[in-house]
Image: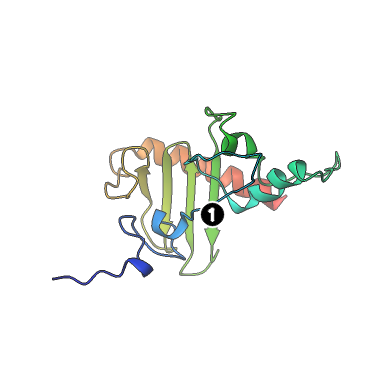
Amino acid sequence: DTPLNKFASNDPLKGWKGQVYEGGMRVPAWVNWKGRLGSGLCDLPMHAVDWLPTLAPISGYEIDDGMSFDGIDVWPLITGEDDNPSERILYWVWGKGRETERVALRKGSWKLLRDGAEGEWELYNLDSDPNELMDLAKKRPDLIQSLKFTLEEEISKDAS
């Protein structure tokens, strides 16, 4: 008897847009290039910052040697040429320094997050728990510390 609104739902993922849970971060993308790209599916994590380093080379745009990007060229992942990518680190910080600060780091299958500046750190293994139902923070304090260190390292790279 519970009404379902699938048009505004991230079901079964936890959260909604603007949050650092998967329901707020996962966004599907479609790529179509007749004659160059066949049908397929790539479910590896990518980020909006990957579009420029991916599309520039295949569109003929020459990237100067001095240019650097936050993203990576994901074309080999999209085409299936590379189905074993190296472990990727992605992070998000929204509302830094405010009460509503939201922070997340994804490293491989692990995701560390804090929803709110005063919130507790949460830890999920997205391979076994993509819906973020089982917080492993209390069971893996060692991993929490390691991932927090990685997060600070990544943030400091962007600050310089």
Q: Residue at x 46, y 70 (%)?
A: 99
User: Residue 2 appears in which quarter of the rendering?
Assistant: bottom left
State the residue position of label 1. Answer: 92
Q: Horizontal and vertical percent for residue 81?
A: 59, 29
Q: Is residue 46 left or right of residue 144?
A: right
Q: Position of residue 78 (x, y in %)?
A: 58, 39
The count of marks equals 1
Q: In the rendering, at what x and y percent does residue 116 appear?
A: 42, 64
Residue closest to the eye, 39 or 150 = 39
Task: Determine the residue located farthest toward the front in the rendered image.
Answer: 35
> What residue do we see at 55% from left, 40% from top?
89
The residue under the point 35% across, 44% down is: 124
Q: Amino acid at mark 1?
A: Trp
Q: Foreground residue, 94 or 133?
A: 133
Foreground: 31 or 23? 31
Q: Is residue 133 left or right of residue 53?
A: left
The colour mode here is rainbow
Quadrant location of residue 71? Answer: top right
Q: Nearer the viewer, residue 51 or 104?
A: 51
Q: Is residue 71 left or right of residue 84?
A: right
Which residue extends farthest left?
1
Q: Regarding mark 1 in the picture, which secondary structure is present there?
A: strand
- Left or right: 65 in relation to 68: right
Other residues around mark 1 within 10 Å, as few (<14) / some (14–19) / many (≥20): some
Q: Position of residue 97 (x, y in %)?
A: 54, 65
Quadrant showing the N terminus: bottom left
